[in-house]
Image: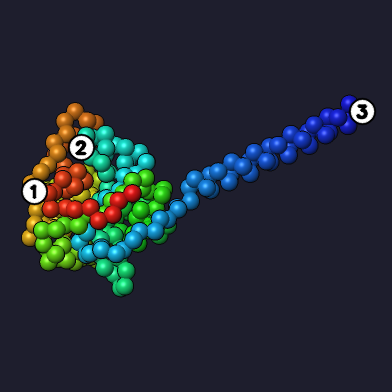
Amino acid sequence: MYLCSRFFFTVKQQRLTLFFTLFALIQIVGCTRSEQVMIPTDGLSEGDLAFRRGSGAKSHAVLYADKEGLYSHVGIIVKEGSGFMVVHVTPGERTPEETVDKIKMERLEEFFARDKAKKGAILHFADSSECSEKAAHCAKTFFEKEILFDHDYNLDDSTKMYCSEMVWRAYLQAGRDITNRKRSVIEGFPVFSGTYIFPSDIFQNEYLTIVYEF
């Protein structure tokens, strides 16, 4: 009788263990799956800027250093075929085939996927549509050159770029300083000490108007 009871207790333990293991796996899959959101494209133009705020460590680090920031990442919208894509450069989003962090071009839905963006916005540069189109063309050129991500965040080095630097350089080549020469100087911060262009330095441009946000 004792052996029988112990056997059933062991089986019950194994079943409970299996149940909780499967439940945990389901939770992991559900949390890491890239849920895409549908972004309306009516009213979008080449050269529009896509801002997002993530929930990961790198997003928190940027926003901790950038006290004025609502968003931690930015890219440029370009026309590709019959749809719109976002050109941007960010660390830690390599494909299985990639061995280095470099510039990317991806669909709006992928850029604003739930696991990457808990908040987002698309802004239009109302000062000059011609300039915006040229900036989009410059961003495509950067993509074709496979510009690497600048882990040193060095504005003096144009061979590698970080996100807001890439947007700034694209618009600068198109004839506009979209930052209006605004820079963020960070001192006493172990990761970001130095002079940088943060997404907020671009977001605050008076000619940027919100087209879409969530």
How far apart marks 2 and 3 lie (CA) works out to 71 Å
How far apart marks 1 and 3 lie (CA) works out to 84 Å
Q: Which mark's residue is nearer the viewer, 1 or 3?
A: 1
Q: Amino acid at mark 1?
A: Asn
Q: Is residue 26 left or right of residue 12?
A: left
Q: Which residue is mark 2?
A: 68
Q: Secondary structure at mark 1?
A: loop
Q: Amino acid at mark 3?
A: Met
Looking at the picture, how far across and down is residue 203, in whole percent? Answer: 19, 47
Looking at the picture, how far across and down is residue 74, in whole percent? Answer: 25, 51
Residue occupying the point 55% across, 43% down: 27
Residue 169: name its quadrant. bottom left
Toward the viewer: 207 or 31? 207
Q: Which residue is mark 1?
A: 180
Q: Secondary structure at mark 2?
A: loop
Q: Which residue is mark 3?
A: 1
Quick one: label 2 or label 1, which is nearer the N terminus?
Answer: 2
Q: Secondary structure at mark 3?
A: loop
